[in-house]
Image (cartoon, coloured by chain):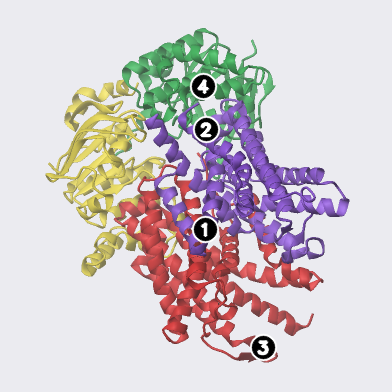
């Protein structure tokens, strides 16, 4: 284990201690939201950073997971866990389908197609207001009746850590190698006997399933969801988080999500300027440090240790 | 439905098409020369709206100069963005240029949106329109602010087409879009043309924002929907094709107004209005990615 | 010397040099042909001279001025024209517009531009007949000839020609070779040409270079080639 | 004897351009065949159809008696057709070892540890062991070509399609590549080699097929093809100069 990994593990350990050392509830709430973004940003980097497929539908997929979970709970009287899983499945299957449909599309063309899918989802959720209450938002039952912020915090921490570990497991397997080979050169990968069609679609599905899980959990935590969680602006925050953390690595991206959410709350006095500054930082990162803050940090620690 | 109602819808469609075309032409111009899709185009449009608002409300200029002011400002913004963020793509300073181009313009969009939120606040502003009142064509009634905005829009489009056709700068833009290497051997300065077309593309978006701002209010988030419409238009017409962008805009304008009429439940119909074009976008990209006017790319 | 290429190396990928130290001279008022098997780097050499490819090492001078790595458009202004192997025209523009674009480098000198256009229509009346037609609709041979005519409009001292007759029928090819010859003989221009058609390429030349795998193999005047190598040309290709 | 790879009446057109005009060609197991022809004669197109990258416009390709039309490149690779590319397609951000593993791991029966052992064996043969853990982006052009060889070797292909493997390669490395090709061939692989480098073609191959404008104009032993007037004309052009 390198020094950098130890530092990261230290952070996770510290995170697990926070409720015990009396961190104010307000900050636990913020961190819980940060963990939601951590899941979302890392799921996005799984697709963009490893398979080289761009998608702007990730926030919409999180919303899909949320709405499916909430609606199946409401209308089919399902308990929370099965409805959450249905949300994950819905997001995963739709992602798989989109991945398969867009096999031949690359770069900006793929970006535009995923924007279209994301926006259609958002518009549908907004339009079907007898079902979803449209943009007024939908009341959601809590994940656990009467649970306090610390409980939610631990659930999200566990979910985020488990998601990232699962992604790492996938990426360390031969499938992860196929993903990266596809990112580098599709024809070259196919020439070696790898079923590019299958893995490209599956990568999309995996990535959106994680987004669906994040969205479902989020819905039952904040207990009020609106279609705005599926907007392109929300997508922009996810992108900024992944880019600033480092989108070439799911761990960096996850930390980026938490880091940005913390900064967002800590710099509240700055008002909307915070977001503008994050935009500028994301731009500068893309231009000058494509590995993000944590990629840069890892390099720094590598040189020292 | 009565004949007048149909005529009214068609006229509405035409007016909307003008704005779509204006925004889409900018995207097409930029894609033609630089081969990148500018995902920050909606925010250029929004900045156009605010530039006009500033000129008219704070500086007290007449509305028509507000539009001119917006064009000048956005031209400058476009040139600045091209020089700092886009140029590195073509000088080999970026590792994965395709990925970079998409993400950097998307990040730019988010940055500009939040910048506008910080500077101007989220409240809608409404600068004075170029003209007010209504215009009657027999039984057909059209609000004057829309009609005048569309009229200026058409003038701008015609002006752009003339520039592309008859001026050296316009010819250089077309030449580089068609064949970069050939343009270079003819002695054309590619990087200057790139800068120019990015600036001009931004200026067109700015003009559209300045024209429509007074009609629908100016707010930081105003760019999102028109930008997506413009992407639909350029994909429909074939990315990078100038005539394609105009025809695509005409088609989308009519599809939207008439498809809305087809759904009986009016609330729903309005809510889904923005989705039709997106379905078209997906279908075109999947079935004929080169669009109606583009030529298929040949491998090998 | 008009153009002098000394020990140039160049390639498209890192560490893979297609040219591994080529030296070529284009003598004023002569037609110099470079021949060699497929893939020896003939086209690469022209692309390197015209600035589309950066040489790894070596030196290129034009009229004693170092032009190594200079932008293409500056070379065009300096009087070098390049006729690429691809049909490098603006296919969606009309023939007349293409003709106009060919005056780009000197468009601000109205008189010169105007006379260049008049001259080209005189030299190639068919361009006038097709003026309103889209360039992409002309036949392959016509596009090829047109490319050459457009390159001549800047009144270049040196013309680099890449595979002038590839894909053309013999009659068209003959016209083009005759044209190239007269540019040298009657107008005193210098031509550096690369040709896959070995026999015709040597026939039309004053001086010949043979390349092999990115390096010089042989060179000599046409007379020397006719006398000594005619029958063994085939050997070098195999 | 039934040929290992049989191509019958194969044609391919791109828009108006006929790149292959109905060619018939067959290869026996263990042959080492050179494929030559002027630029644009259809060599790479032919390779791309055999490898599944292009769909033929007409005709058929048969591998050991089974038609392969319409199969994906990955399926063909697993059926035993390995190929290299004119411009090397190494995975730059993966290590040399990872590059080698991709193809082996595409076969799920092979465990990761045995794939790794196999890869180390091949790397040793190619003298790349030292670079196993370096990113492929750090390789020189020639080393990248060798890595591509190695990746194909990991598949144990029955048929190897090599598209311009010697372009821009250092003479010393080229000799090393000759050796590997011959070893490969002697181990039983059928090899189809495209090259502009006539020295290599005539030095290595026992059979040379010449394409010109999408047709086969010669097919036979190197000496016969070398002296075939049609081949000469295809390469030299004719006397139609002024």
Above-or-below relation of C227 to A198: above
Label 1 belongs to which residue? B39
The residue labelled by disc 4 is D100
Q: Which chain is red?
A: B
Tell me the residue that label 2 is attached to: D45
Q: Is residue C38 left or right of residue D151?
A: left
Q: Is residue A85 above or below residue B112?
A: above
Element on which disc 1 rests: loop
Q: Say which chain is purple.
A: A
Q: Nearer the viewer, mark 3 or mark 4?
A: 4
Q: Chain of mark 2?
A: D
Please state the horizontal and vertical placement of residue B264, each as a whole percent of the image.
82, 71
User: Which chain is indicated by disc 1?
Assistant: B
Whether discs 2 and 4 lie on one chain: the answer is yes
Figure quadrant of the N terminus of chain C: top left
The residues bearing labels 3 and 1 have C-alpha atoms spaced at a distance of 36 Å
The disc at residue B141 is 3
Alpha-carbon span between mark 1 and mark 4: 38 Å
Residue A17: x and y in percent read 60, 40
Query: How dense is the environment of label 2, judged by Cα within 10 Å: few (below 14), some, or many (20 and up)?
Result: many
Q: Is residue B50 left or right of residue C224?
A: right
**Label pair 3/1, CB-CB below 8 angstroms:** no
Residue D83 appears in the rendering = yes
């Amino acid at each position: 284990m390198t020094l950098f990994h130890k530092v990261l593990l230290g952070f996770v350990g510290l995170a697990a201690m926070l409720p015990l050392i009396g961190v104010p509830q307000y900050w636990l709430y913020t961190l819980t939201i940060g963990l939601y973004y951590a899941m979302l940003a890392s799921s996005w980097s799984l697709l963009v950073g490893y398979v080289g497929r761009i998608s702007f539908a990730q926030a919409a997929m999180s919303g899909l997971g949320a709405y499916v979970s909430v609606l199946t709970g409401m209308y089919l009287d399902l308990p929370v866990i099965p409805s959450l899983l249905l949300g994950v499945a819905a997001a995963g299957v739709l992602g798989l389908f989109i991945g398969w449909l867009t096999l031949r599309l690359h770069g900006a063309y793929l970006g535009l197609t995923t924007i279209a899918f994301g926006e259609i989802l958002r518009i549908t959720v907004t339009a079907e207001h007898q079902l979803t209450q449209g943009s007024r938002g939908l009341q959601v039952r809590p994940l656990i009746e009467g649970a306090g912020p610390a409980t939610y915090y631990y659930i999200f921490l566990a979910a985020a850590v488990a998601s990232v570990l699962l992604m790492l497991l996938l990426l360390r397997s031969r499938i992860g190698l196929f993903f990266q080979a596809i990112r580098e050169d599709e024809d070259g990968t196919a020439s070696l006997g790898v079923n590019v069609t299958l893995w490209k679609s599956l990568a999309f599905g995996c990535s959106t399933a994680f987004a669906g899980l994040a969205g479902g959990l989020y819905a039952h935590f904040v207990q009020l969801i609106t279609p705005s969680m599926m907007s392109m602006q929300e997508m922009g925050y996810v992108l900024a988080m992944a880019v600033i953390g480092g989108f070439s690595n799911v761990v960096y991206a996850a930390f980026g999500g938490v880091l940005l959410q913390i900064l967002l709350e800590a710099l509240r006095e700055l008002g909307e300027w915070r977001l503008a500054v994050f935009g500028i930082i994301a731009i500068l990162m893309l231009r000058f440090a494509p590995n993000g803050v944590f990629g840069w940090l890892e390099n720094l620690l590598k040189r020292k240790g | 439905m009565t004949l007048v109602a149909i005529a009214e819808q068609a006229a509405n469609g035409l007016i909307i098409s003008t704005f779509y075309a204006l925004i889409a032409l900018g995207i097409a111009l930029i894609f033609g020369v630089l081969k990148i899709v500018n995902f920050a185009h909606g925010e250029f449009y929004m900045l156009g709206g605010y530039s006009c608002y500033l000129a008219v409300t704070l500086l007290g200029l007449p509305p028509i100069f507000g539009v001119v002011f917006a064009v000048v400002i956005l031209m400058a913004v476009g040139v600045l963005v091209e020089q700092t963020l886009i140029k590195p793509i073509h000088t080999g300073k970026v590792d994965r240029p395709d990925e970079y181009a998409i993400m950097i313009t998307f990040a730019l969009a988010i940055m500009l949106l939040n910048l506008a939120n910080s500077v101007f606040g989220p409240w809608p502003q409404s600068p004075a329109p170029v003209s007010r009142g209504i215009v009657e064509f027999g039984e057909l009634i059209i609000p004057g602010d829309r009609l005048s905005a569309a009229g200026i829009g058409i003038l701008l489009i015609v002006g752009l087409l003339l520039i592309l056709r008859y001026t050296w700068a316009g010819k250089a833009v077309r030449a580089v879009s068609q064949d970069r290497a050939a343009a270079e051997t003819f002695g054309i300065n590619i990087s200057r043309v790139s800068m120019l077309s990015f600036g001009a593309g931004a200026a067109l978006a700015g003009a559209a924002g300045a024209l429509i701002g007074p009609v629908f209010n100016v707010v930081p988030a105003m760019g999102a929907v028109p930008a997506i419409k413009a992407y639909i238009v350029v994909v429909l017409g074939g990315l990078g094709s100038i005539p394609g962008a105009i025809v695509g805009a005409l088609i989308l304008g009519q599809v939207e107004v008439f498809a809305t009429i087809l759904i009986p439940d009016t609330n729903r119909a309005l809510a889904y209005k923005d989705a039709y074009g997106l379905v078209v976008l997906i279908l075109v990209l999947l079935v004929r990615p080169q669009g109606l006017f583009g030529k298929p790319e040949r491998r090998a | 010397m008009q153009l002098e290429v000394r020990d140039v190396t160049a390639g498209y990928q890192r560490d893979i040099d297609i040219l591994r130290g080529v030296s070529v001279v284009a003598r004023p008022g002569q037609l110099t042909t470079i021949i060699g098997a497929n893939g020896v780097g003939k086209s690469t050499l022209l692309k390197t001279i015209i600035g589309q490819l950066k040489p790894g090492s070596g030196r290129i001078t034009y009229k004693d001025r170092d032009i190594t790595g200079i932008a293409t458009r500056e070379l065009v202004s300096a009087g070098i024209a390049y006729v690429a192997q691809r049909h490098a025209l603006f296919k969606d523009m009309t023939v007349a517009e293409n003709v106009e674009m060919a005056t780009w480098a000197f468009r601000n000198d109205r008189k010169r531009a105007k006379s260049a256009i008049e001259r080209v229509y005189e030299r190639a009346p068919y361009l006038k007949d097709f003026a309103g037609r889209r360039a992409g609709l002309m036949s392959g041979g016509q596009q090829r000839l047109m490319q050459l005519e457009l390159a001549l409009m800047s009144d270049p001292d040196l013309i680099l020609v890449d595979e002038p007759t590839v894909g053309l029928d013999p009659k068209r090819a003959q016209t083009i070779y005759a044209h190239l010859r007269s540019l040298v003989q009657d107008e005193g221009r210098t031509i550096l040409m690369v040709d896959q058609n070995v026999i015709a390429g040597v026939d039309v030349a004053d001086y010949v270079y043979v390349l092999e795998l990115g390096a010089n193999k042989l060179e000599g005047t046409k007379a020397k080639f006719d006398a000594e190598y005619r029958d063994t040309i085939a050997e070098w290709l195999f | 004897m039934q040929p290992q790879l049989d191509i019958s009446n194969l044609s391919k057109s791109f828009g108006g351009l006929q790149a292959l005009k109905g060619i018939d060609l067959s290869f026996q197991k263990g042959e080492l065949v050179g494929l030559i022809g002027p630029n644009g004669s259809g060599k790479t197109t032919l390779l791309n159809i055999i490898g599944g990258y292009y769909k033929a416009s007409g005709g058929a390709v048969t591998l050991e008696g089974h038609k392969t039309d319409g199969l994906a490149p990955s399926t063909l690779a697993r059926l035993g057709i390995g190929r290299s590319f004119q411009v090397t397609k190494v995975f730059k951000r993966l290590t040399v070892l990872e590059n080698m593993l991709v193809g082996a791991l595409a076969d799920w029966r092979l465990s990761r540890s045995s794939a790794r052992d196999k890869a180390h064996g091949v790397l040793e043969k190619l003298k790349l062991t030292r670079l196993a853990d370096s990113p492929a982006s750090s390789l020189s052009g020639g080393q990248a070509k060798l890595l591509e060889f190695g990746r194909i070797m990991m598949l144990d292909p029955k048929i190897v399609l090599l598209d311009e493997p010697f372009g821009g390669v250092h003479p010393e490395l080229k000799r090393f590549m000759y050796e590997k090709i011959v070893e490969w061939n002697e181990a039983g692989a059928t090899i189809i080699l495209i090259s502009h480098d006539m020295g290599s073609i005539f030095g290595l191959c026992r059979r040379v097929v010449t394409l010109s404008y999408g047709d086969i104009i010669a097919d036979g032993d190197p000496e016969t093809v070398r002296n075939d007037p049609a081949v000469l004309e295809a390469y030299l052009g004719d006397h139609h100069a002024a």
